[in-house]
Amino acid sequence: MAVLGLLITGYLAWTAGSGSASAFCTGDGSCDAIQRSGWSTLLGLPMALWGFGLYAVVALVSLSRKASLLLRWQRQWRLVLLGLAISLYLTAVGKLVLDAFCIGCLASLAVLIAMFACLQVRRPAAAPGQPWGRWWGMQAVPVLLVVALLHVHQSGLLHQRPESRRAAALAQHLTDYGAKFYGASWCVECSRQKRHFGHAADRLPYVECSPGGRNTPMVSACAAAGVTVFPTWVIDGIEHNGVMEPQQLAVLTRFDWDKAAAAD
């Protein structure tokens, strides 16, 4: 089963690194939404590559005969539990945040579930005599801590910029200038754009294009503007796609960025 996981994650890592379309993808754009999201990478590496590493370690532990049967099982159990928890977390993010699923990711999740079920059934007779529930608790706490740290990192909670008078002044200037920032509630890049302004993001001329979710029709204002990707800035009638630095927006709207720095 670890070898099967290696094949799945290896293929996903290759497609992510090469930019190729995955054979697992369907035509609904779910794969693209996930691959372009901030959750698709960790520390600059594709998340699939981290999964490949986990399966490789499980395979090595499974092939090792130096450790006792009990010790080998314990190591397998901890590794698979960690992988399963992270996979479930990412699947939940895909559904709740991106409203999208990756078939290859679901295939990897199925492999992890099968591995975990197998380990549960094949628990050695020499396993610790303490209550099974206590064993579960002792192993689950560090796994939940890892998932919590992953969430804090991936959701950008550590990257929120502090209050800045310059950012607030620019955000208000963009509104007064008539610029428009078109985004969607499920768009990770839109969240990144807002984080550039910290707490001043509420003052941005933001237009929510998809309040109902990723697969719902765009609101009329966005459809009339011809918005096809998120985020999209419209300044002086010209579209600018993707996340833009505040300095870029300042130049495009003739905002004195250096003078505003004195306010901070």
Image (cartoon, rainbow, N blue to C red):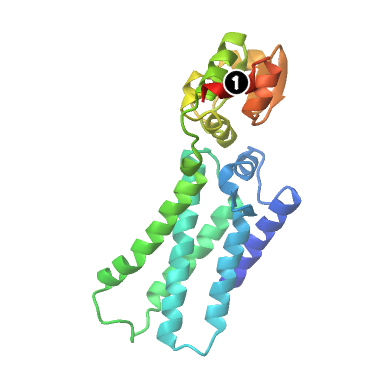
Residue density around tag 1, few if under 14, some if 14–19, many if 20 or more, within 10 Å: many
Residue toward you, 205 or 187: 205
Question: With 166 as the anchor, is 142 left or right in this view?
Answer: left
Residue toward you, 79 or 104: 79
Residue toward you, 73 or 171: 171
- Could you tell me the amino acid type at mark 1? Phe
Residue positioned most to the left? 131
Let me know if residue 69 appears in the view. yes
Q: Residue at x 56, y 31 (%)?
A: 196
Position of residue 229 relative to residue 129, above or below, is above
Residue toward you, 123 or 202: 202
Q: Residue at x 57, y 61 (%)?
A: 51
| Residue 250 drawn at (x, y percent) | 65, 20
Question: With 31 as the anchor, is 195 left or right in this view?
Answer: left
Residue at disc 1, secondary structure: strand
| Residue 256 drawn at (x, y percent) | 64, 17
Q: How many marks?
A: 1
Q: Quadrant of residue 190?
A: top right
| Residue 104 drawn at (x, y percent) | 61, 54
| Residue 128 drawn at (x, y percent) | 30, 81
Please give the residue where the numbered disc 1 appears in the rendered image.
181
Question: In the rendered view of the protein, which quadrant contains the N terminus?
Answer: bottom right
Let me know if residue 227 appears in the view. no
